[in-house]
Image (cartoon, rainbow, N blue to C red):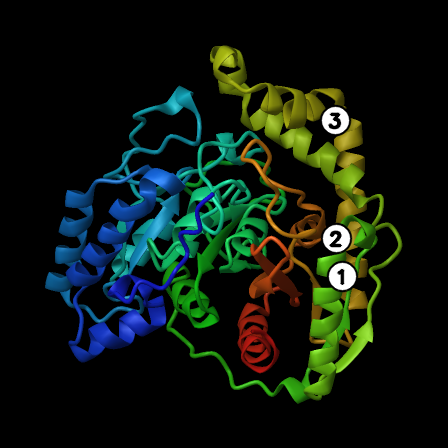
């Protein structure tokens, strides 16, 4: 067991927002910040295994190029890492599978190109589970290396949590950004479906796939959101917690969370009420409990088709978990079942939007508890599934430690395409009531 998440007193501890300010003042360079991150990686990577690909010389060249360009972009000089299902022109992309060892894309995915155009420094590729599905790779939780970092964005969450890099891209098809971010004590963000371009990001389930961000502050999410979407950066709004209408949503699966998570969410709700927020119990519309079954049909049907080449040409290199999981689900699902489930989900989305009309956001668990022991499983995504399915934005915030001294998070859910509003409220809540 090793806890590798300590403040080390170097520039590697800076958040992206702090780094942009220092670089803007001339007190720091992209190269110096990148070297600090590389030093941190060299110190602990052999224990965390967060990176699928890292070329320190290339990272330094990218930093020097950012310093030379001096564009003063939104994320000028900030190193960022990319989950290894995101294509890059100067680094291989392996999709978490031996099938694609050494695979080199011809171009950068737009999310990478946009961040580079905004002054960011592409640092390296972080470990993904196999095709962003359930079969884990070697990454460990930096708070306790005997535990999982979660999945499928395991390397991104571990790298940010261990102060190897300020920000990293993840993806979410069920709970693959929010859950590992919570397990690793970081801030995680799943945008509204469709806001972030997915071109150049390996398909999993197109109906639900969402590019996500993992960082160490909510302000960093706003910075990188602007960069990814090629929009002007709008500082987060000054939100008064006392003016927020918050729905405490235990969900239909409350009994799958442990007692510590129950207490954490209830305490957070009480603290928000004490700070003046209007906190009410909130229940999702009828059908929530059976929604995961509809998701299995849609996810399986689409994923089994996305994986057609690998299934036909490289089946011997695919894991049992993948073949007996989502692929098998898809092969059992008829086209009529797929379309029927899709219709149920589409109708449920609209009912869930209507149910949230009179509140600003929801408070709900990020995960059932602390990161599970071992690295053969990545944890339960039951508290993320419905929000990914309904396409709404989600943020997880660090909210203390559990009995095993592993991080716990709370999840906030906003309205579709009102992400800036959610991020602003999340910052206010983090400042006012969270440790």
Q: Nearer the viewer, residue 72 or 140?
A: 140
Q: CA distance from mark 1 to mark 2?
A: 6 Å
Q: Residues within 10 Å of mark 3 (few under 14, many from 20)?
A: some
Q: Which structural element holds mark 3?
A: helix
Q: Residues within 10 Å of mark 2 (few under 14, many from 20)?
A: few
Q: Which mark is residue 335?
A: 3
Q: Nearer the viewer, residue 236 or 32?
A: 32
**What's the residue at 52%, 13% (across, down)?**
315
3 vs 1, front mark: 1
Residue at the outermost left position: 68
Q: Which mark is residue 262?
A: 1
- Quick check: marks 1 and 2 in contact, CB under 8 Å? yes
Is any atom of residue 393 visible in this view?
no
3 vs 2, front mark: 2
Q: Which mark is residue 258?
A: 2
Q: How many marks?
A: 3
Residue 99 in percent (x, y) is at 41, 20
Q: Residue 223 appears in which quarter of the rendering?
A: bottom left
Q: CA distance from mark 3 to mark 2?
A: 38 Å
Say whether disc 3 or disc 2 marks the residue closer to the N-terminus: 2
Q: Which structural element holds mark 2?
A: loop
**What's the residue at 30%, 40% (across, down)?**
88
Residue 322 in percent (x, y) is at 59, 24
Q: Residues within 10 Å of mark 1 (few under 14, many from 20)?
A: some
Q: CA distance from mark 3 to mark 1?
A: 40 Å
**What's the residue at 89%, 54% (across, down)?**
286
């Amino acid at each position: 067991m090793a806890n590798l998440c300590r403040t080390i007193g170097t520039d590697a501890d800076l958040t992206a927002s702090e780094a942009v300010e220092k670089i803007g003042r001339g007190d720091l360079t992209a190269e110096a910040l990148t070297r600090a991150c590389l030093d941190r990686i060299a110190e602990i990577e052999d224990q965390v295994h967060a990176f699928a690909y890292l070329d320190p010389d290339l990272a330094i060249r990218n930093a020097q190029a950012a310093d030379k360009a001096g564009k003063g972009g939104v994320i000028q000089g900030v190193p960022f890492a990319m989950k290894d299902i995101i294509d890059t022109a100067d680094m291989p992309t392996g999709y978490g599978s031996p099938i694609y060892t050494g695979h080199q894309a011809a171009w950068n995915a737009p999310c990478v190109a946009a961040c580079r155009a905004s002054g960011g420094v592409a640092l390296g590729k972080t470990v993904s589970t196999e095709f962003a599905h359930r079969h884990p790779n070697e990454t460990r939780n930096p708070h306790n290396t005997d535990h999982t970092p979660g999945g499928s964005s395991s390397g991104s969450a571990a790298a940010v949590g261990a102060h190897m890099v300020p920000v990293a891209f993840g993806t979410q098809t069920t709970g693959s950004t929010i859950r590992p971010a919570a397990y690793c004590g970081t801030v995680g963000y799943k945008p509204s479906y469709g806001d972030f371009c997915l071109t150049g990001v390996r398909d999993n389930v197109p109906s639900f796939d969402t590019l996500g961000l993992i960082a160490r502050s909510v302000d960093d999410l706003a910075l990188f959101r602007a960069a990814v979407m090629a929009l002007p950066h709008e500082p987060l709004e000054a939100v008064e917690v006392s003016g927020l209408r918050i729905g405490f949503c235990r969900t239909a699966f409350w009994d799958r969370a442990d007692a510590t998570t129950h207490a954490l969410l209830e305490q957070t709700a009480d603290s928000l009420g004490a700070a003046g927020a209007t906190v009410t119990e909130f229940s999702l519309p009828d059908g929530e409990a059976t929604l995961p079954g509809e998701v299995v049909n849609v996810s399986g049907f689409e994923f089994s088709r996305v994986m057609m080449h690998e299934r036909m040409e490289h089946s011997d290199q695919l894991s049992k978990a993948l073949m007996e999981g989502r692929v098998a689900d898809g092969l059992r699902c008829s086209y009529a079942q797929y379309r029927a489930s899709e219709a149920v989900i589409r109708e449920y989305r609209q009912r869930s939007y209507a149910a949230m009309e009179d509140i600003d956001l929801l408070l709900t668990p990020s995960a059932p508890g602390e990161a599970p022991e071992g690295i053969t499983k990545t944890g339960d995504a039951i508290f993320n599934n419905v929000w990914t399915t309904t396409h709404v934005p989600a943020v997880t915030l660090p909210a203390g430690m559990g009995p095993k001294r592993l991080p716990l998070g709370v999840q906030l859910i906003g309205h579709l395409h009102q992400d800036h509003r959610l991020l602003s409220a999340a910052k206010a809540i983090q400042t006012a009531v969270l440790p």
